Amino acid sequence: MELRQLKYFTCLYEEGSVTRAATRLNIVQPALSMQISKLEEELGQALFERTSKGMIPTEAGEQAYRLFMPLLGELLEARQTLIHRNGEISGRINAGLIASAANQALASTLAYFVEHHPNVDLQVSYGYSQNLIDRVLAGDLDFAVINQAFQQERLNRIDLVDEELLVATGAANRLRVPAPVPLAALSGMKLVLPSRLHGLRIVIDQALAALGLEVMPHLELDDLTVVESFLRRSDYVSVLPATVLRQGLEEGALRGYPLDSPGLTRRMVCVHDSRRPLTPAAHLFVDIIGKTLATGLNAIHFYKEGASQDPDHELG
């Protein structure tokens, strides 16, 4: 039994089609069919039923998939470890990031890799969390940095940061509500939020729904940098991650206020397909971007606390 045969078998099982599996593996169909036939001959039983609708796993095929998947993952991880045991990081990384993570941490992470690991080729894509998940599962991306609001059995998760969401306004905007801001008060505000496709909006809506609350924004914008810029020029209010507000808070162009208990937070995570272990280069990239995000959070505390301690106990 060869590693190649295990890879071909699991791919065919997941795709259910010789054509799709061969395309995903970047091989010709006869080569795939030949290796599957050899595996079936070695095991002494059919793993698939050939039908006009595709390749249907037999009972033996179902059992083989359950047994082979953990072994394949361990073998691939061991292979990567041995290849890179000389300590030199190389290879190619195809990463997907939600825009807020890219805006906050990507430049620093890329600068580190260019300087310290010039043999690593990088390709980075942006997108909504669900879109990035789909691309990870399709094999287009090695991993994605997303908001945690999405669940998928086939994904392994690495927690990066838990980030507080703040009520954000322009510096000239005064809101007549208590501080910290009650969650129920959000429904009466002139809000600009991302659309319901955006991972951050999903986090907000899910958290509020659990408390029996709902918000209906007056304006929806998916680009958080545009939202931040718009707040500076308007009387709108938003709920944004602390790191998105960092520059505006430092410049005095924005105000950021904590929400009353239980507050709102988002967890940023890295996800990758459990069938494809991360390479050493990918592991390093994820570690660095996580540390960069955490460093940005630590710089927010002073500005948030200063803004929330208003002498007349009102925001503004």
Image (cartoon, rainbow, N blue to C red):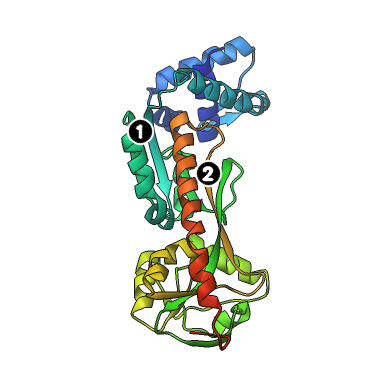
Instruction: Give the alpha-carbon distance from disc 1 to disc 2, as whole Å.
Output: 25 Å
Seen at 37% across and 56% down, the residue is: 103
Locate residue 84 relative to residue 6 in the image: left or right.
Answer: left
What is the three-letter code of the residue carrying label 1? Answer: His
User: Percent position (x, y) of residue 99?
Assistant: 40, 56
Give the mark nearest the N terminus, 1 or 2: 1
Of 239 and 192, which appears nearest the observer? Answer: 239
Compared to residue 7, the image places residue 232 above or below, namely below
Compared to residue 51, the image places residue 251 above or below, namely below
For the N terminus, the quadrant is top right
User: Percent position (x, y) of residue 197?
Assistant: 47, 63
Label drawn at residue 312: none
Seen at 33% across and 42% down, the residue is: 111
| Quarter of the view holding residue 78 | top right
- Of all residues, the one furthest to the top in this rendering is 42
Locate residue 216 relative to residue 25 in the image: left or right.
Answer: right
Of 296 and 105, which appears nearest the observer? Answer: 296
One can see residue 280 in this view: yes
Classify 10 Å Cα crowding around label 2: few (below 14), some (14-19), many (20 and above). Answer: many
Circle 1/circle 2 CB separation < 8 Å: no
Seen at 50% across and 18% down, the residue is: 82
What is the three-letter code of the residue carrying label 2? Answer: Val
Compared to residue 187, the image places residue 45 above or below, namely above
User: Percent position (x, y) of residue 53?
Assistant: 51, 35
Label 2 residue SS: strand
User: Percent position (x, y) of residue 255?
Assistant: 45, 76
Residue at which label 2 appears: 271
Of 254 and 138, which appears nearest the observer? Answer: 254
Label drawn at residue 116: 1
Label 1 residue SS: helix
Viewer-nearest of discs 1 and 2: 1
| Quarter of the view holding residue 25 | top left
